[in-house]
């Protein structure tokens, strides 16, 4: 290990790697040297616990706890290392290779500040160090959270799931949420948009909202989540729409359990009239949780072979598991125009060959749709007369009317 006995402040050890054998993480060695030069050391697991009690540990700014699949039998020891480091106010970066999501979840809940997968992506360790060195945000006293006002609701849950890349699921989720939030000047229904595409979710980009680290903190410990914690993870767009963005860092989709997702959905439905979910295109073990809870599950496709094949795969998967396939409402994006008889015939043949009903046909909004995503605005604000925006507005009104009629009947 590099000497951990500083002669003066300029030579003080600023960080340590902690691992079973640091030679198993050669890329980590390179990145530590690039970031800190010679001002870092290496410790074994047992050595680390002893070192934290020494005065030399006072100069440490962070430790990089590097583990792989062989270390999963010692999770209690890993957890103790994290706990002791936090007691000394030392930041912890968790470097993990071939570790199960359950183990990652357990260690992150112990208080690890950052998670970086191994092999390390280019520049990721430097970015993690920079994030940890940022000063804590100044607490801002805000007005009462919308979650603390009014009686408990039982909001409608609408889900949008793109069955192929680039079919426009986020565009639909964002704009449907905004149209529902502005559907009526008199009633002003409350709407919450949840971005559950935990790795590549772009709702924050579409609405020009920052990604908050509190989102990951909440999702990784939903057992402790209450209304206040949930409210702190939300952001308000234009004072009309509450948004839960994807986490600031890429996390494994299966790091979150079905129970975690159920708690988030239940909390959102208790406090909002409408909850819109933007799903990842990948099926994960909590996809069933969302499907079972959904009132309407929009499966977005295009008029092409990849969408047709994926729709058929999804149909077979749901029916094989006896899941409620009938909840799916297939929506065709970039649908052919009314005068395109050949295109209309292709849509009909596609539905018949797949044995599905294509209930919603969304027109091609053109460049305005792509630009609205880059400009951080819903279509209603960026291109109100766009044909796709008009279709979203019609859909929102029909869903709102259906909800109002059901409420009156009840």
Image: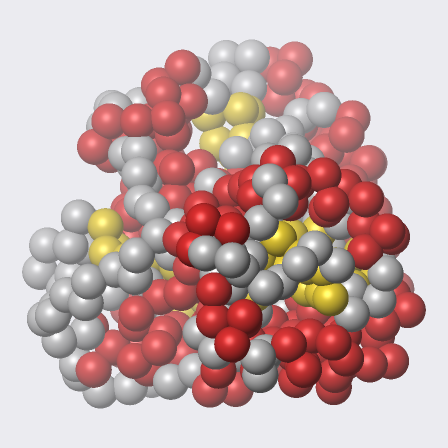
- Coloring scheme used: secondary structure
**x 22%, y 87%: residue:** 151
Front in this rendered view, residue 143 or 250: 250
**x 63%, y 69%: residue:** 256
Q: Position of residue 69 (x, y in %)?
A: 87, 65
Based on the displayed image, in which of its 4 quarters is residue 56 positioned? bottom right
**x 23%, y 50%: residue:** 237
For residue 225, say whether it is visible. Answer: yes
- In the displayed structure image, the side of residue 149 where residue 205 appears, left or right: right
Front in this rendered view, residue 48 or 190: 48
Q: Is residue 164 above or below residue 79?
A: above
Q: Position of residue 254 (x, y in %)?
A: 70, 64
**x 55%, y 25%: residue:** 335
Q: Quadrant of the C terminus?
A: bottom left
- In the displayed structure image, the side of residue 55 where residue 395 appears, left or right: left
Q: Quadrant of the N terminus?
A: bottom right
Q: Position of residue 286 (x, y in %)?
A: 67, 68
For residue 325, say whether it is visible. Answer: no
Q: Is residue 280 above or below residue 76?
A: above
Q: Position of residue 164 (x, y in %)?
A: 68, 36
Q: Is residue 14 above or below residue 324?
A: above
């Amino acid at each position: 290990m590099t000497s951990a006995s500083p002669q003066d402040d300029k030579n003080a050890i600023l960080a340590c790697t902690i691992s079973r054998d640091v030679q198993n993480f050669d890329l980590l060695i390179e990145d530590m040297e690039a970031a800190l030069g010679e001002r870092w050391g290496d410790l074994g697991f047992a050595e680390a616990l002893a070192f934290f009690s020494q005065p030399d540990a006072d100069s440490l700014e962070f430790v990089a706890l590097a583990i792989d699949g062989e270390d999963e039998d010692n999770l209690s020891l890993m957890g103790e290392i994290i706990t002791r480091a936090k007691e000394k106010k030392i930041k912890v970066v968790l470097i993990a290779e071939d570790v199960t999501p359950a183990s990652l979840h357990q260690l992150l809940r112990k208080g690890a500040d950052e998670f970086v997968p191994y092999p390390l992506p280019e520049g990721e360790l430097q970015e993690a160090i920079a994030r940890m060195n940022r000063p804590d945000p100044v607490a801002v006293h805000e007005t009462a959270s919308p979650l603390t006002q009014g009686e408990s609701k039982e909001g409608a849950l609408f889900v949008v799931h793109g069955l192929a890349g680039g079919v426009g699921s986020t565009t639909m989720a964002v704009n449907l949420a905004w149209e529902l939030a502005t559907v009526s000047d008199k009633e002003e229904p409350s709407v919450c948009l949840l971005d559950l595409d935990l790795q590549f979710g772009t709702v924050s980009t579409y609405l020009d909202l920052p990604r908050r680290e509190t989102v990951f903190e909440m999702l990784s410990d939903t057992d402790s989540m209450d209304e206040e914690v949930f409210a702190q993870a939300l952001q308000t767009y234009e004072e009309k729409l509450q948004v839960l963005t994807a986490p600031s860092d890429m996390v494994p989709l299966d790091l979150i359990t079905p129970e975690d997702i159920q708690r988030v959905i239940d909390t959102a439905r208790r406090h909002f009239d409408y909850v819109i979910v933007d799903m990842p295109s990948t099926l994960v073990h909590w996809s069933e949780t969302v499907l079972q809870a959904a009132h309407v599950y929009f499966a977005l496709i295009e008029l092409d072979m990849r969408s047709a094949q994926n729709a058929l795969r999804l149909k077979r998967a749901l029916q094989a598991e006896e899941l409620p396939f009938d909840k799916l409402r297939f929506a065709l994006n970039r649908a052919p125009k009314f005068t395109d008889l050949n295109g209309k015939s292709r849509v009909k043949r596609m539905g018949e060959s797949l044995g599905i009903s294509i209930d919603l046909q969304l027109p091609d909004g053109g460049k305005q749709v792509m630009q609205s995503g880059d400009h951080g605005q819903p279509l209603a604000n960026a291109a109100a007369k766009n044909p796709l925006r008009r279709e979203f507005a019609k859909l929102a009104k029909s869903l709102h009317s259906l909800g109002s009629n059901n409420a009156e009947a009840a």
